[in-house]
Image: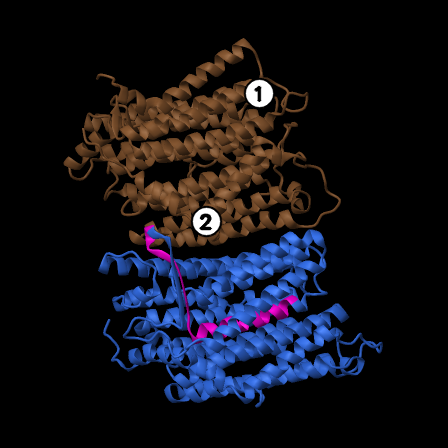
Amino acid sequence: MEFTTQHFIALLPLLITSATVVLVMLAIAWKRNHTLTFGLSVLGLNLALLSLLPALGVTPIEVTPLLLVDKFACYYMALVLAATLACVTLTHAYLGGESGKGYPGNREELYLLMLLSAAGGLVLVSAQHLAGLFIGLELLSVPTYGMIAYAFFNKRSLEAGIKYMVLSAAGSAFLLFGMALLYAESGNLTFAGIGAKLAADGLPSMLAQLGVGMMLIGLSFKLSLVPFHLWTPDVYEGAPAPVAAFLATASKVAVFAVLLRLYQMSPATAGGWLNELLTLIAIASIIFGNLLALLQNNLKRLLGYSSIAHFGYLLVALIASKGLAVEAVGVYLATYVLTSLGAFGVITLMSTPYSGRDADALYEYRGLFWRRPYLTAVLTVMMLSLAGIPLTAGFIGKFYVVAAGVQSQQWWLLAALVIGSAIGVFYYLRVMVTLFMVEPNLRRHDAPLHWGQQAGGVMLLFVALLAFFLGVYPQPLLELVQQASLVALLP
Amino acid sequence: MILPWLILIPFIGGLLCWQCERFGNILPRWIALLTMALLFGLSLWLWATGDFSLAPAPGAAPQWAAEFQLPWIERFGISVHLALDGLSVLMISLTGLLGVLSVLCSWNEIQNRVGFFHLNLMWILGGVVGVFLAVDLFLFFFFWEMMLVPMYFLIALWGHSGSDGKTRITAATKFFIFTQASGLIMLLAILGLVFVHFDQTGVLTFNYADLLNTKMAAGTEYILMLGFFIAFAVKFPVVPFHSWLPDAHAQAPTAGSVDLAGILLKTAAYGLMRFALPLFPNASAEFAPIAQWLGVFAIIYGALLSFAQTDIKRLVAYSSVSHMGFVLIAIYSASEIALQGAVVQMLAHGLSAAALFILCGQLYERLHTRDMREMGGIWARMPWLPALSLFFAAAALGLPGTGNFVGEFLILIGSFQSAPWVTVVAATGLVFGSVYSLIMIHRAYFGPAKADTALPGLQLRELSMVLGLAVLLILLGVYPQPVLDTSAASMQGVQQWLGSALNQPVPAR
């Protein structure tokens, strides 16, 4: 195919991100400078975000058979880029300034890995072809192995990195096998092509169902849905806090976006046992995620389990798949990203600068309100948002998901959702009330005194205000998401 | 234009209290007091000037004494739609009054984080006013859930630990989970109703007036009605769902108990009258006998458990369960007299329970215990308080001359026609009521004294609060006509909805 300017414009976000990767790499080779690297990354990401505006003008456009840049892709690109930007900001605070304090090893490569991973996310959300999906997914995952094990002299971090690598590779293997089966059945690798072929056959054959099932398993690994969730708490705990934030936000958003596109464009699960399987996975994720989170005394593990439950809620919208579903996923993911960034951001700032281990034990947050009122306010808003209480963005997301579920009458899933959120409230409240408990003699971990003046702190306050604002007046977000509907661009 | 201000005033006042904490502990209290006085004053002004013959009734578009509408989330047809009728203005006035009292009664009790405390207090009241005004179902749910968070903080941070080792955090969490989970069920029902309406008309809306005309299959209507009923039953509380109430009451600070018993329970009754019955009249008519027997059970069970308590606040809490049972019977009786009685009963119970909790709080400040086994003989040790307690205990058992008598009498006389057996059994609740009320007085104030030192007497602030409540309660008992006039049109509407459904032959399913 011939490349025109339009194609380049549509690809601009990806191109800019990739160029930033190269530039950052060269800059590191030339001179190691933490601030410079950070500055370059932020600049690149901001440019990439800005370049979405011209890209929106040419959508929907097919760029090579692999990628389809439509409004849907642009919306999720924006989410991925914004989440990465926030994570980069947090990383800068976390690794420490120029003085001796902070992370002892080489700091600059973390940015490189994060940018690479973000580029993978950009590919993934615009993939319309199984090859594109795989390229994107691996580009997203492989750098994260390095990021999780970045504090490699810390045993937990290394262990988490290796664990994630092994399980992620296993997931990829399932995914590849599934793709091969689908190709064998339909002779086509584009989402729409597979969908058309399967629809033409009437009921999908056993082979095709098996293929889709295996792909679902592969993606479930990445999304940490029960029963493929076993890596999540360990990895969340072991990974450095900003990396965990990246994992919970940018990485999961991208994978869920491609799952949604796949699910919407190739209706291979329609009417088969696969839908029941997915329903079971959703119910199990909601119930087990919430139940296991009850027992945690480590904030990062708790957030890990809660993310399992939240992706269970998202599956409700995915399974509903009609009416509001695509919008519901868009809104829910946006609010979830916002909330996770806030929660992990607080953990990051509490652990800033890096000092061997993160401040993630719940007891370290006792009475935080009396020492760090603004940080506590942020975390409180985030916990309320995760629990889906009105006045926070999380409520709007949950409302949307419930609406999508009611519209397509998924009563079992909704029952699980109600039970799940009732359990969920318990541990979110536990975290919240811990923050306010009076504990005068415990002052071990404090966020730096001027945290509000640092970029990370400012970003965090912004996130909290945004979460509040969207909870009170969600109309702008809803309009944005409504625009970002999927376009079925048939070949 | 005044309606949104009724909601905004407490919210803004709360923020001011929080920020003014840095200037000392006194300023937040005064700001809170002024805020609540303003709210109370506004509601009284509305009451005095409004035309409350306008109220929603079946067959026509709902009419309101005052209305306010502003688009909010257009995607779902959600608007900030507030409206006022006789029932809401009474409830808001009660909220304002109890708001003033709850600020006053925590004047000495709360000493740490005064600003944050008042922020929570104001926000609860703001949320409650929102519940009483909202006629958009999303907005209603929004306020319904929103008032939980500050209440949770109020119990968890400023509460007392329980007498049997239960912590205040457990109690607060229990309260939160019960109400939140039931609220979600209501959300499901709301969305179910909205989508049924959407399927019929193609219009996505959460507006009360539009949803009133939804036609539903009998089965659907019944299930959706149950969704609403469960949420309201938890808050009410109807007996199988009541177990959060005594814990929350016992552990809450005085202001929390006052708000909880005085206003929060009333939101459930209000919700039934405003939403559950008019939206689902046929299903409600079918469900009415079950609801009424649940009410009877609550009356007797609440009274018996109340009798068995040793913690004085738990005793009052269980008596609330019992009193709210009367309201439940009245709501489902489809008799205008009984419904009017329910309104009076709600006001009277709001006043008398608030007063009893305030008295318990004052007692606790002096004795540092709520255990009645540790009390006894207080009558001899201090003036005023025991006598006033006796008055309110008598009011709670329905002594003629107090508002509670008017309420219970109207409820019983009104429901007798449609449900004689329910009424007969419910009337025995009055006997049990006198048993637990008098036993409380007996255990706490009479009998052998545990110590013979005199206790500090009531300050002017404390005395005037309780005396004021006593005067209001007597006024309500002697001359309830203004209240009855105000709520007449609203109750007539509710009666017509349920009455016409009851008189229809039961649809075959």
Q: Residue A471 carries which label?
A: 2
Query: Could you say which chain is coloured blue in the image?
Result: B
The residue sitting at 39% across, 81% down in the picture is B333
Our reading of the magenta stretch's main secondary structure is helix
- Does residue B430 appear anywhere in the picture? yes
Judging depth in this view, the residue of B414 and B56 nearest the camera is: B56
For disc 1, the chain is A
Q: Using the numbered discs, state the Cα–Cα distance from disc 1 to disc 2 in whole angstroms.
A: 35 Å
Classify mark 2: residues with Cα within 10 Å, few (<14), some (14-19) or many (20+): many
Badge 1 marks a residue whose secondary structure is helix
Compared across the picture, whether B336 is left or right of A28 comes to left
Classify mark 1: residues with Cα within 10 Å, few (<14), some (14-19) or many (20+): few
Reading the image, the residue beneath label 1 is: A35
Compared across the picture, whether B194 is left or right of B329 comes to left
Badge 2 marks a residue whose secondary structure is helix
Q: What kind of colouring is applied to the model shown? A: by chain
Query: Could you say which chain is coloured brown in the image?
Result: A
* Membership of B433 in magenta stretch: no
The residue sitting at 36% across, 42% down in the picture is A329
